[in-house]
Amino acid sequence: MTHEEARDLIPGYAVDALEPEEAARVEAHLLSCGDCRGELAVLRDAAASLATGVAQTAPPQEMRNRIIRAIGGQGRRTSSSHRGWIIGMAVAAGLIVLLGGIDVMLQQRLATLNARLAAQARALALLANPSARTVALAGTASGAVRLVFDPSSRVGVLVASGLRDPGRNLVYQLWLVAGQAPESAGVFRPAPDEPTIVTVVADFNKYHAIAISVEQAPAGAPRPTTTPILTGVIPGSG
Amino acid sequence: MGPVRDQGDDETLLTRIARSDLEAFRAVYDRYSGQVYSLAWSMLRDASVAQEITQDVFLAIWRGAGAFDLGRGTARSWILSLAHHKSVDAVRRWRRAITAPLSEGIRDDADVVEEAMRKVDSAGVQDALRALSADQREAIVLAYYGGYTQREIADRLRTPLGTVKTRIRDGLLRLREMLGRGVREETVR
């Protein structure tokens, strides 16, 4: 999705008036576009006033405890006479929390696998695309890292294998460079023993270089704070 | 005013929630559960569905606070957008289950808009909506309170999609001018 297309859809996105596939594409664009995130912030502010304009009704009292229980926190008050019973309850509650935790874990695992499959499908589609271009990144880090992108659809994937774990509380951050100002194109941590695929949605014609630096987890930095470990030149459209 | 004890600003609370701070979560719940529940209730008119949505929203806050991005708006607008998103989902599921699509509208457009306008209780928001052009108001009310997509709205109004998009955008920007940035509605009980 081009920047202009995304820009055109952001008001609809702010009020949840897009078709699901449009919303997903805007979401992907937002990851790499600070301008559009800023526009969304402004429009969401207006939408929030609409939200608070409706008649105010208090939710039922017991809902608060139910929700807090659901996230696994219990305000436990022990009175000695009921200790055995309370321990039983606590064990049961612990089991529920545990099962809930496993469920969340499985769901997260499934979401991760789905995202990975989608990224692999994108990578394969790009490799089969005759207009796709490839940039090999080189620098001080070991590992094979390539960007494959299609300038016309503005979709690219970064495929990295053999990159070392960046270390605790650190991530690799991807930068697209136009002129003097690198723009963040997302962060990632390499998975052990399998290549990492990062989807990059951008107007590649605008940028002349791509770089990777090591930044603080989880979100990276707005501007690179360390020297890039890998860089590559993005060929101009010819 | 009111008994609301200041636990720090919303963004700080979300940062604490991301570190699994239950007290911060309770503070956010106490601050926003009324607004979240009210929005869901006014869109669905069903207490049990509104409760389900509210629960989903707060679970999403608990799990997703770490991914909150101030670049996309304030914590307040994020929380309310979660509430709206889940309410719209429920409205669409319900509509798919029981009624014809908007394009086969049975009732007059004006009725649908007026019905949605009746959900608005705050005089300030009412006035601001009335101050929009009729076209902008119609598009925004159908999208936001009605839960229709901009494509459905364009079909129903037999208006080009681009025009509907422009009305939503311009209308939102005017609302924001009139209602102020990050306005906090006093809900004193």
Image (spheres, coloured by chain):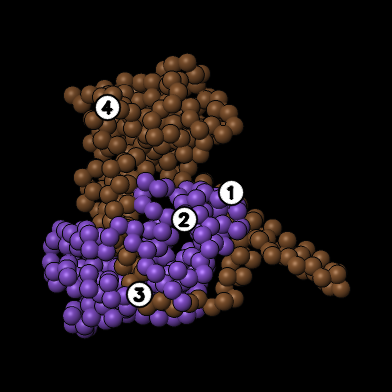
Q: Are marks 4 and 3 on the same chain?
A: yes
Q: Look at the image and tell me in which quarter the N terminus of chain B lies.
A: bottom left
Q: Which residue is mark 1?
A: B19
Q: Identify the element where label 2 is drawn.
A: helix
Q: CA distance from mark 2 to mark 1?
A: 14 Å
Residue B121 location (% of width, % of height) = 32, 78
Give the amino acid at mark 4: Ala
Residue A231 location (% of width, % of height) = 38, 20
Q: CA distance from mark 4 to mark 1?
A: 36 Å
- Disc 2 is attached to a residue of which chain? B
Q: Are marks 3 and 2 on the same chain?
A: no
From the rendered image, report the letter of the chain displayed in brown. A
Asked where in the image residue A152 lies, by quadrant, the reply is top left
Q: Residues within 10 Å of mark 3 (few under 14, many from 20)?
A: many
Query: Which residue shows up at 43% across the image and 26% down it?
Result: A225
Give the amino acid at mark 3: Val
Residue B8 location (% of width, % of height) = 50, 54
Query: Which residue shows up at 32% across the image and 52% down it?
Result: A41
